[in-house]
Image (spheres, rainbow, N blue to C red):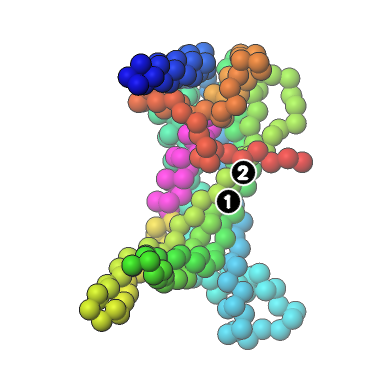
Amino acid sequence: MKSNKNITWLLIGIIVLIGLTSCNPEKQLAIDFASKTNQKSILIISPDFLFKKSLKTYILDSIEHNRKDNEDSLLIVHSKYLNELNDSLFLANYVLGYAKSLTNFGFRVFNQNQAEQFLRIDSNTYQVNIAQIELEETLYTFRDEMNVYDQYFYHDHNLNAIYVNSWFEYSNTNEVATKQQVYFTTDLITDIPDGSFDYDIFSGKLRYSYNIDSLEVGSLYSFAYRIGSEYAKYTFDLLLNDELNKKIPPSERSDYYWRYNPMQNQFFPADDDRFIPLSD
């Protein structure tokens, strides 16, 4: 019996070793790519304005309007957040978070005002066009739930929410011009519920109490910076995986879309934390 266990652990060890070995070329290339980011330059082209849309159409039932009115404009005027938002400040924070995080990765980052300087660089250059940013104001249903003695209890919160949808275009300016691939990503910020269930085992009654930390317009500016910084990580991953696809034969390339954190030397699949390529 002991011999069988030893054989089992030996087989597991071999399988793990094979897995690590198969990933080795990709990780080594990732380390090499990260070590040379200071030789790579990125030009960021940012949008001039935000697209904004309120999905709280129920508001129309409580305001006077006629069919000739532009309902989209009315919804923005009567929105809780979009009408108060400073578009320029939101964009500035978004791009600042994006550019600063790329710089932290080691890239040399240029903005539109430095385009002439950027164009004088003859190798290892990329252009990133943040083609569009759209904010959608809506309600988001969050369910707080628990099981007590095989009984299921829940409370639904309708939270104020803002989706930030972003479209990016990338190109390697040293390669022959091809149609740019468009990538999409989205993030959500909401009110923050803080609830708790209190079950009385003697009476069998359940009480639910909660507080809501309401979303404020000011929170959107720090949120813009945070997601801009996060999308810089997505950008690093995108350029890294493009490098892996070019340098590793398809027969040797794993099916993973990798994320590499050069600060902590972590190499792992990116899963859902990545840009979504859009087809035509």
Tell me if residue 38 comes above or below residue 52 in the rendering.
above
Most frequent secondary structure within the magenta stretch: helix
Tell me if residue 76 comes above or below residue 98 in the rendering.
below
Residue 183: name its quadrant: top right
Residue located at (56% from left, 28% from top): 256
> Which SS class for mark 2?
strand
The residue identified by callout 2 is: 184
Tell me if residue 163 comes above or below residue 106 in the rendering.
below
Q: Are marks 1 and 2 in contact (CB under 8 Å)?
A: yes
Extreme-left residue of the structure:
202
Residue located at (51% from left, 13% from top): 25
Question: In the image, which residues are magenta?
Answer: 221-237
Q: Position of residue 241 (x, y in %)?
A: 57, 25
Residue located at (48% from left, 52% from top): 90
> Which SS class for mark 1?
strand
Please say whether residue 3 is one of the residues in the magenta stretch.
no
Observer-nearest residue: 174 or 31? 31
Which quadrant is home to the C terminus? top right
Observer-nearest residue: 272 or 48? 272
Residue 165: assigned label: 1
Tell me if residue 140 comes above or below residue 1 in the rendering.
below
Q: Position of residue 81 (x, y in %)?
A: 48, 66
Task: Say if residue 152 shows up in the picture.
Answer: yes
Which amino acid, mark 1?
Asn
Please say whether residue 226 is one of the residues in the magenta stretch.
yes
Q: Position of residue 1 (x, y in %)?
A: 35, 21
Q: Position of residue 145 (x, y in %)?
A: 40, 65
The 10 Å Cα crowd at callout 2, few under 14, some 14 to 19, many 20 or more, is some
Which amino acid, mark 2?
Phe
Residue located at (27% from left, 72% from top): 198
Gap between marks 1 and 2 measured at Cα? 7 Å
The 10 Å Cα crowd at callout 1, few under 14, some 14 to 19, many 20 or more, is some
